[in-house]
């Protein structure tokens, strides 16, 4: 009977005198006294064999052994950690060069956007913004898009749930309406931003992309002013002033045109991009329809203006030779890292 008391006493002195001085020895200590199969655990069971009058004393002794093992383990662990820190400090080489931070890079859409914005800012345009969630009036009605226009179709437009009124803007043109209803001419703005269309996602089209809108309203603004402005833009952006305006249709401009830039076809890439014509389609434009001016509270008898809108992704794809529009939105660092050198 006295044997169990003795066993516990022995363990206690073993715990008190243990001096593990390596992480491995400390782990041995932990396994022996605190692990799931530790030596103290079975001693609790031995209480069955201790006579009643000594049970309490025995229980306290075993508990003491357990608590001691825990306390000792914690203090030994701290001592060892301090030791290895001191050793590391001794080896510290202050002359070693630091680890460089990995530099991030701008997204190719941002770089392209910034380039376009800067070109127009130099011509005196300032940046305007509108919300991605638009109402039907700014996106369609003000822009002279009739109720039965196919662009309003659910198949093209993302409407917000339970709302015939709120939608994700399908182009940046609603910013025209926002500016014209809040500012007096002369107006000279560009509006970069995200637009949304309910389209099947493929290598060439995405349900979310970026546009830059431009608007110039003042007295006596002519088609020639628009052409000159866009020609200058083409020169700065693509290094060629050779542009072509093809007649087109938009509900909010009259007359309307689409602008192509001459990229030639003297190499395979340009031949492919221009589908064998040498011309690359860049933007839609036209003279602001007098009805749009009127919708926005600007007197069409006194003022005239031009507007244009262009997609960014397509231009970025051309600029950086990117074959698939989806790459822009996957945020794969292996893709993005390639644009580190681009400012
Ligand atoms: N909003 C037109 C589009 O998304 C582009 C455009 C803007 C055309 C302004 C003419 C004038 O295709």
Image (spheres, rainbow, N blue to C red):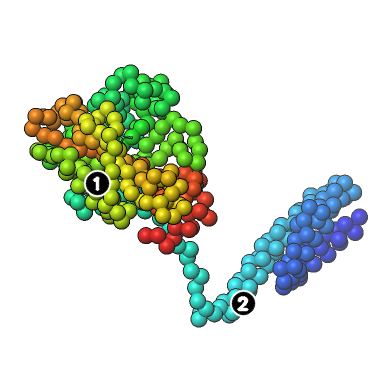
Return the x and y of residue 66 as percentages of the image width and height: 75, 56
**Mark 1 CB within 8 Å of ligand 1:** no
Quarter of the picture containing the N terminus is bottom right
Q: Residue at x 47, y 50 (%)?
A: 322
Are there few (<14), some (14-19), or many (20+) residues within 10 Å of tag 2?
A: few
Residue 43 to residue 24: above or below: above
Q: Is residue 298 left or right of residue 260?
A: left
Q: Badge 1 is on which residue?
A: 230
Position of 121 with respect to 45 (left or right) is: left
280 on left or right of 299: right
Query: Can you identify the residue that label 2 sits on?
Result: 87
Vertical placement of residue 285 versus 138, above or below:
below
Give the SS element for disc 1.
helix
- SS category of the residue bearing label 2: helix
Ligand 1, image quadrant it occupies: top left
Outermost residue toward the top in this view: 148
Foreground of the two, 165 or 257? 257
The picture places residue 156, in percent across and down from the top left corner, at: 41, 27
Whole-Å distance between the Cαs marked 2 and 1? Answer: 68 Å
Kindly indicate the quadrant of the structure image that contains residue 280. top left
- Across and down, in percent, residue 148 comes to 33, 18
Instruction: Count the labels in the image.
Output: 2
Tell me the mark number nearer the camera, choosing from 2 and 1.
1
* Label disc, if present, on residue 68 of the rendered structure: none
- Callout 1: 10 Å neighbours few (<14), some, many (20+)? some
Mark 2 or 1 closer to N-term? Answer: 2
Name which residue lies at 50% across and 53% down: 335
Image quadrant in which you'd find residue 88: bottom right
Is there CB contact under 8 Å for labels 2 and 1?
A: no
In this picture, is 37 found above or below 248?
A: below
């Amino acid at each position: 009977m006295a044997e169990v008391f003795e066993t516990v006493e022995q363990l206690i002195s073993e715990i008190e005198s243990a001096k593990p001085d390596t992480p491995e020895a400390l782990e041995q200590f932990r396994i022996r006294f605190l692990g799931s199969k530790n030596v103290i655990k079975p001693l609790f069971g031995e209480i069955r064999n201790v006579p009643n009058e000594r049970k309490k004393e025995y229980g306290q002794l075993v508990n003491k052994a357990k608590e001691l093992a825990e306390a000792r383990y914690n203090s030994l662990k701290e001592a060892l950690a301090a030791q290895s820190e001191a050793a590391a400090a001794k080896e510290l080489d202050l002359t070693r060069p630091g680890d460089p931070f990995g530099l991030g890079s701008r997204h190719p859409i941002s770089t392209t956007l910034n380039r376009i914005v800067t070109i127009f800012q130099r011509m005196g345009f300032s940046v305007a913004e509108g919300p991605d969630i638009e109402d039907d009036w700014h996106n369609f009605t003000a822009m002279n898009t009739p109720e039965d226009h196919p662009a309003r179709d659910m198949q093209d437009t993302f409407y917000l749930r339970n709302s015939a009124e709120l939608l994700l803007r399908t182009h940046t043109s609603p910013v025209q309406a926002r500016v014209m209803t809040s500012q007096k001419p002369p107006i000279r703005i560009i509006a970069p931003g995200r637009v949304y269309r309910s389209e099947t996602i493929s290598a060439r089209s995405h349900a979310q992309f970026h546009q830059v809108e431009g608007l110039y309203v003042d007295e006596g603004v002519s088609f020639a002013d628009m052409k000159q402005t866009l020609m200058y833009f083409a020169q700065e952006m693509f290094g060629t002033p050779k542009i072509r305006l093809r007649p087109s249709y938009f509900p909010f401009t009259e007359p309307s045109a689409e602008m192509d830039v001459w990229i030639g076809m003297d190499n395979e890439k340009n031949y492919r991009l221009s589908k064998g014509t040498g011309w690359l389609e860049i933007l839609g434009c036209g003279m602001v329809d007098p009805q749009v001016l009127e919708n926005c509270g600007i007197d069409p008898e006194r003022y005239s203006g031009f507007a244009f809108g262009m997609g960014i992704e397509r231009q970025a794809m051309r600029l950086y030779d990117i074959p698939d529009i989806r790459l822009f939105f996957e945020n794969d660092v292996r893709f993005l890292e390639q644009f580190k050198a681009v400012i």
